[in-house]
Amino acid sequence: MTSLTHDGQSAQSNSPLQEQGAAMDATSVSGKCLCGSIVFQYTGEPNWTLHCHCESCRRATSSPITTWISVPRSAFAFTKGAPRYFHSSPGVRRGFCKNCGSPLTYENERIEGEIHIYAVSLLDANYASPSCHVFVNEQLPWFEALDDLPRFATTGRDGASPIRIGPKKKKLD
């Protein structure tokens, strides 16, 4: 199915977050910040789950890749505490815990009906099932994820084809 990336553009998604196991029921998924001051919950299936390599996401998380889950805003709620926000670019705000600094959300005015959460903020991040990588044209040269997911130069919107499936091939000397 076609869905939106963290920046409001579409990406190919063929496997939404898989909810299974005893820790969470089939309709409710919870997450929290590092210190536990902020807890959130969403119900139902996410819109999409993907890995992003863009510089903005890398800088927001101080990591080489960010894994996002998009959920309908109407299905999402903070159940304990509330984040502070940093306006990272026009129309975009990123929520974080004021106590421990954990990044929690990405919100974009262009896609008001969605909120994007970090997969690793879930109580059990094993429930995330990413379907692709986006913005691999900004990928760090020293990092490679060893999965067989499609890679898009920027996004998969407008029927874009992936630039490759799976990791880069190592060049033999």
Image (cartoon, helix red, strand yellow):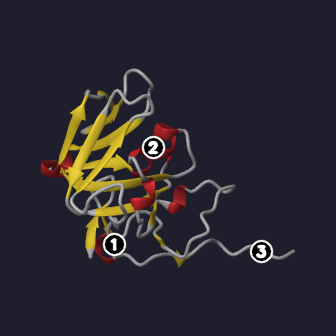
For label 2, the residue is: 56
Residue beneath the point at 26% across and 67% down = 3
Residue beneath the point at 31% across and 43% down = 106
Q: Nearer the viewer, residue 26 or 6?
A: 26
Name the mark nearer the viewer: 3 or 1: 1
Q: Which quarter of the image is occupied by the C terminus? A: bottom right
Which residue is situated farthest in the front direction here? 22
What amino acid type is highlighted by mark number 1?
Ser
From the viewer's perspective, tell me whether residue 31 is left or right of residue 66: left
Q: Which numbered disc, 1 or 2, marks the residue that appears first in the sequence?
A: 1
For label 1, the residue is: 13
Above or below 142: residue 16: below
Above or below 68: residue 37: above
Q: Residues within 10 Å of mark 3 (few under 14, many from 20)?
A: few
Marks 3/1: CA–CA distance: 30 Å
Q: Visible in this render: residue 93?
A: no
For label 3, the residue is: 171
What amino acid type is highlighted by mark number 2?
Ser
